[in-house]
């Protein structure tokens, strides 16, 4: 993607890579559980963050960061994710943590569906995944 593919003022977003937290960086093996960030790093995730950050701005997106989410142990979801990243010494590679879909060159998400056309998409949904 070139800079001319972005509206004026958003050229810096070319360097953004958006990465989901649960199921991509942290194993999320207990589901919601108690709302904390309890899981272990997914194999290779910490090393990948370090490598990706050399060329791109990493933006972590997660529903945990939604402002409407209740506090867990007196902390916001954003604070919990940040603490987890700090515990694993990778917060310094992350530009931002957000609940919003950021402007990004690519999205890395375990629950994403790669859209190609509506016919295939409807058939996929009719098969109920």
Image: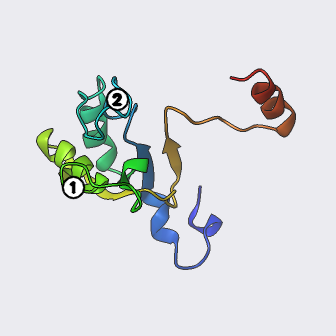
Q: Quadrant of the N terminus?
A: bottom right
Q: Which residue is mark 1?
A: 75
Rendered view: 63 above or below 12: above
Q: Which residue is mark 2?
A: 28
Structural crowding at the residue carrying mark 2, measured as other residues with C-alpha within 10 Å and reported as few (<14), some (14–19) or many (≥20): some
- Foreground residue, 11 or 65? 65
Q: Identify the residue at image location x=15%, y=38%.
A: 88
Q: Identify the residue at image location x=33%, y=54%.
A: 70
The image quarter containing residue 22 is top left
Dot 1 or dot 2, earlier in sequence: 2
Q: Secondary structure at mark 1?
A: loop
- The location of residue 15, given as percent across then percent down, is 43, 58
Calculate the distance from the C-alpha at mark 1 to the C-alpha at mark 2: 18 Å
- The location of residue 71, given as percent across then percent down, is 27, 55
With 127 as the anchor, is 33 left or right in this view? Answer: left
- The location of residue 77, given as percent across then percent down, is 30, 52
Does the residue at mark 1 contact the one at mark 2 (Cβ under 8 Å)?
no
Rendered view: 55 above or below 125: below
């Amino acid at each position: 993607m070139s800079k001319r593919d972005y509206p004026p003022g958003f050229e810096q977003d070319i360097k953004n890579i958006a990465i989901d937290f649960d199921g991509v960086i942290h194993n999320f093996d207990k589901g919601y559980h108690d709302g904390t960030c309890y899981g272990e790093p997914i194999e290779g995730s910490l090393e990948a963050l370090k490598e990706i950050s050399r060329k791109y701005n990493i933006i972590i997106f997660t529903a945990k960061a939604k402002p409407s989410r209740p506090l867990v142990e007196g902390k916001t979801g954003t604070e919990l994710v940040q603490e987890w990243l700090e515990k694993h010494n990778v917060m310094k590679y992350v530009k931002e943590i957000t609940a919003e879909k950021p402007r990004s060159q690519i999205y890395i998400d375990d629950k994403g569906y790669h859209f190609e056309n509506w016919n295939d998409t409807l058939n996929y949904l009719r098969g109920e995944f």
